[in-house]
Image (cartoon, rainbow, N blue to C red):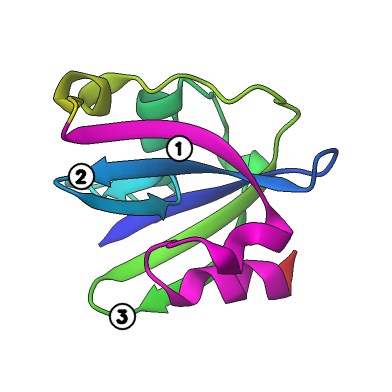
Amino acid sequence: MRARIVLYNPENKAVLLIHRLKNGRNYWVIPGGGVEKNETPIDTAIREINEELNIHLKSADLIHFFKCEGKEYEEFFYTEIPYIVAPKINGEEKERASSNNVYQPEWVAVKELTKINLMPPEIAAKIVTLI
């Protein structure tokens, strides 16, 4: 199971995503990661955002957004953040990064989400509908 957070900036009407370039593949993901032992999905989402992006959130900051039961079960949460500049990647992702494994946080306008390779594919339409 994975937990992710849709980080939305209402001022620029954009979502903070991680642009991935991995072994020739070019795609985007919503920040988050895998649940560790004895963690709730919301705890996982908060931990992962802190580790990956150095953004500190509390459970009261998040609302449950939707769940995706595709290949892997994923819980998505939502919050609004005031950041305009995308943070730098941190944690394990920074350590694993290389020229063949890029993690680049970037703001993407909501209206552009259906035009990029956001994984899993059904997520872009869901976000556009709900925001």
Residue carrying label 1: 46
> Does residue 99 appear in this view?
yes
Q: Is residue 48 inside the magenta stretch?
A: no
Tag 2 and tag 1, C-beta contact below 8 Å: no
User: In the image, what residue occupies the spot 41% across and 52% down?
Assistant: 28
Above or below for 99 versus 115? above
Callout 2: 10 Å neighbours few (<14), some, many (20+)? Answer: some
Position of 68 with respect to 87 (left or right) is left
Alpha carbon separation for disc pair 2 and 3 = 22 Å
Residue carrying label 3: 70
Q: What's under tag 1, amino acid-wise?
A: Ile
* Mark 2 / mark 3, whichever is N-terminal: 2
Residue 36, picture quadrant: top left
From the viewer's perspective, is the residue at label 1 or at label 3 nearer?
A: 3
Callout 1: 10 Å neighbours few (<14), some, many (20+)? Answer: many
Residue carrying label 2: 22
Q: What's under tag 3, amino acid-wise?
A: Gly
Helix, strand or loop at mark 2: strand
Q: Residue furthest front?
A: 24
Please give the range of residues in magenta.
100-129
Position of 22 with respect to 125 (left or right) is left
Q: What's under tag 2, amino acid-wise?
A: Lys
Residue 90, picture quadrant: top left
Alpha carbon separation for disc pair 1 and 3 = 22 Å
Alpha carbon separation for disc pair 2 and 1 = 25 Å
Q: Position of residue 63 (x, y in %)?
A: 64, 55
Helix, strand or loop at mark 1: helix
Q: Is residue 124 inside the magenta stretch?
A: yes
User: In the image, what residue occupies the spot 19% across and 49% down?
Assistant: 24
